[in-house]
Amino acid sequence: MKALVVSQLGPDFAGCALADLPDPERGPGQVLIRVRAASLNFPDLLMTEGKYQLKPDLPFVPGMEVAGEVVEADRDSGFAPGDAVVAGTRLGGFAELVAADARSVRRLPANLDFAAGASVGAAYNTAYVSLVRCANVQPGEWVLVHGASGGVGLAAVDLAKALGARVIATSRSPDKLATVAADYSVDATLPAPGFREAVKEITGGGADVIFDPVGGDIFDESTRCIAFGGRLLVIGFTSGRIASVATNIPLIKGFSVIGVRAGEYGRRFPDKGRENQDAIWALAAEGRIRPRVDRRYALADWRAAFEAMRDSRMIGKIVIEP
């Protein structure tokens, strides 16, 4: 099979190349899937440089989530050849075939194509753990979402609206914000940085919840426009700078800083992790959340896909189709 292989770690994806590999052998409790779409996530890029929490042994095939058709499965798995499914893989998704743990496989909702199905799991799981499990967002609360045009940010916008929250979306791109506002009915859009005073004015004092996958200056400014009793969610550091905060600021303003590792949450609390996934996929099947696939690339064009994500050229998700 064709697969994208990371054989060494380094900048500019220098250690990545397309290669021919033996087809994976399905082990007990696994489902062999012919990959029709694999979602690209920012951690995939970080792993090519060894900068993510998960540091696989070299060589490895990146790709955290896929959609495709079952090739082989155990008889008692509930799946049969030809079934359209989605799966979380952590690794191995950017290939023509992948063997996935049957516990991570579920049927693709009829209202989603393969590309949309591959775009739900990781992004919306991060949004769900953040907004529901960690922040306990309530209807009518103000949620400020940074990086709102990226895959994870847009999932947070979408889910927050489904939860009945009022949403302020920020981005460095006015054009992207206009698309987000039109497609997802956000309540306000603001440039980032430079949102602090406008957030306080719009909300009447500060945002109840702030979703921050950007870090750096955006985190610093967020601490100045959060409501008393607010929840500031640390999702990541796409800006490249890990921010810090003087502890007198959350003390005086009475807000919490909450770190979010959605995948680790599910591993630490398996029952809650399954509940999260059940809730996410029920929302997707009902059409209450709507993943946005912005760009599709063939496996041979993996570098163009990686560069588009690195340069934040997308609105929503990038998908690789082997």
Image: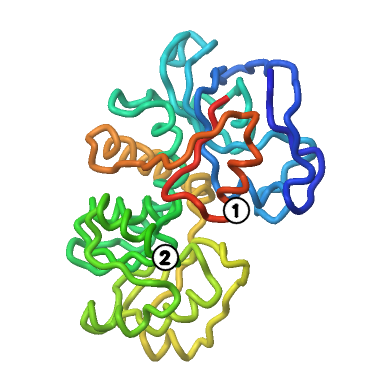
User: In the image shown, does 54 or 265 lie closer to the viewer?
Assistant: 54
Give the answer, above or below, for where 61 lies relative to 147.
Answer: above
Question: In the displayed structure, does residue 50 sit left or right of residue 172?
Answer: right
Q: Which mark is residue 171?
A: 2
Q: Position of residue 63 (x, y in %)?
A: 60, 36
Give the answer, above or below, for where 62 lies relative to 97.
Answer: below
Q: Which mark is residue 310?
A: 1
Q: Position of residue 52 (x, y in %)?
A: 66, 53
**Rendering quarter of residue 99:** top right
Q: Position of residue 13 (x, y in %)?
A: 73, 46
The three-letter code of the residue at mark 2 reads Ser
> Residue at position x 48%, y 21% from top?
68
Farthest residue to the front: give it.
175
Q: How is the image coloured?
A: rainbow
> Residue at position x 34%, y 71% from top?
190
Q: Position of residue 157 (x, y in %)?
A: 32, 56
> Residue at position x 38%, y 67% from top?
170
Label 2 sits on a secondary structure element that is strand
Counting residues from the N terminus, which is met first, the one under dot 2 or under dot 1?
2
> Residue at position x 28%, y 43% from top?
289
The three-letter code of the residue at mark 1 reads Arg
Label 1 sits on a secondary structure element that is helix
User: In the image shown, does 300 or 45 lie closer to the viewer?
Assistant: 300
Quadrant of the frame with the C terminus: top right
Q: Residues within 10 Å of mark 2 (few under 14, many from 20)?
A: many
Mark 2 and mark 1 residues within 8 Å of each other at the beta carbon: no
Q: Which mark is residue 8?
A: none
**Rendering quarter of residue 230:** bottom left
Q: Residues within 10 Å of mark 1 (few under 14, many from 20)?
A: some
Give the answer, above or below, for where 99 lies relative to 277.
Answer: above
